[in-house]
Image (cartoon, rainbow, N blue to C red):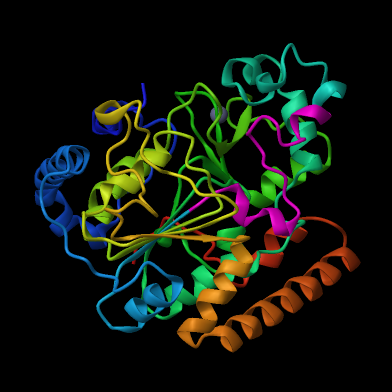
Amino acid sequence: MSDASELPKKEEKEEEVTPEPEEQSDDSSGEEATGDTEMDFLRNLFSSTLGLGSADKVLDELTLDAVARYINSGKCKNIICMVGAGISTSAGIPDFRSPGTGLYANLQKYDLPYPEAIFQIDYFKKHPEPFFALAKELYPGQFKPTICHYFMKLLKDKGHLRRCYTQNIDTLERVAGLEGEDLIEAHGTFYTSHCVSFCCRKEYNLDWMKDKIFSDDIPRCDKCKSLVKPDIVFFGENLPVRFFTSMKMDFPCCDLLIVMGTSLQVQPFAGLVGRVSKSCPRLLINMEKAGQADPLFGLLGFGGGMDFDSDKAYRDVAHISTCDEGCLALAELLGWKEELEELVKQEHARIDSQDKKEKASGSKGAAAKASSASVAPEPEKEE
Ligand SMILES: [Zn+2]
């Protein structure tokens, strides 16, 4: 079942994935707003599905120019980005989990009962070797963030970014300079790891995990000798609890939703597009249109599907291109193009020189250190 309205029920019992403190900055208003937010969501779901209710037309036309004018108008303070594998393909990162992307075809050598087993938690606990062999092959950090990642960093620097919800586990958002509080890593991250034993749950950092992976050791907990697993969400595991708590605070106050590099097919992530207010413009930058309401499912489908070109379309804009091209085009319209290109150039040069230094002094932790200049060492710590 994929009904987005089921989400809130899940959140109490799912502490085990990421037992992190909530964001204090949002708590004061967030607590009491939660009930209202649920009501708002239901109201939006019904009114949009039934065509009831009114919505303000914020964009004067459904084009990228209009979105840029809106961002520059001063009325667009809270932008939420929702991103998927498509934003990292230009960095050379294969789509880690989705079948049919070529990755699964390369798994024969691991002798799996079926390809998805490599990301299944029960299989992993018995046979961790294939996962860690693949992790070595695809280790995040051998890659540089893309123009699109740095575009989101610019949104943050200019005070527009409310949050980035990512489906990616490659940590490139962090390498590009987004910090823990800017990010919801919906499918988890390689950035931290935990002991799989429920009574231990000791945390390990990226350097520790990288050492183990590259020395072909199966990572075991110092304290209890159980397996240690990167905090990516395996099949059969729940999404991080922070995904559910943050979405309730973030989406009702969103002024602009930018969806990039995802076909919006994985729930509950996809259902987030229906959680913004009916007046909130939504921009899709992707190689194909996505997220449109499914006429077959109606109420059962997620509420508030995208509508780019019907007679009733009033807020959804589709820019069909690669994520990098779309971000560059938007940056140009915003007057940020040079700044974006300069940022990409500088950061890539910094990562290259860091990599060289690390290689010269042994290969330990090269990727982790390459990113550490722009990434807080303890991302969840609150000031
Ligand atoms: Zn342990």
Image coords of residue 199 (percent x, y): 45, 24
Residue in view at x 43 percent, y 44 percent: 291
In the image, which residues are magenta?
Answer: 83-106
Which residue does the image show at 21% across and 60% down from the upper left?
279
Vertically, is 118 above or below 74? Answer: above
Q: Decide if residue 12 is in sight here.
A: no
Residue visible at 80% across and 28% down?
A: 105
Say whether residue 253 is magenta.
no
Q: Is residue 321 left or right of residue 249?
A: right
In the picture shown, does residue 260 fall above or below 104? below
Q: Give whichever of 205, 150 is nearer the camera.
A: 150
Q: Quadrant of residue 293?
A: top left
Residue 53: x, y in percent?
Answer: 10, 49
In the rendered structure, the answer to whether residue 118 lies left or right of residue 183 reads right
Count of marks placed on residues = 0
Q: What residue lies at 65% left-to-right and 55% top-to-bottom? A: 88
Q: Position of residue 56 (x, y in %)?
A: 17, 64
Above or below for 354 versus 158:
above
Q: Quadrant of ligand 1?
A: top right
The residue furthest front is 311
Instruction: Decide which of 333, 203 is in the foreground and name it.
Output: 333
The extreme right residue here reads 360
Nearer to the camera, 294 or 167: 294
Give the quarter of the figure containing the N terminus.
top left
For the C terminus, the image quarter is bottom left
- Asked whether residue 98 is drawn in magenta, I would say yes
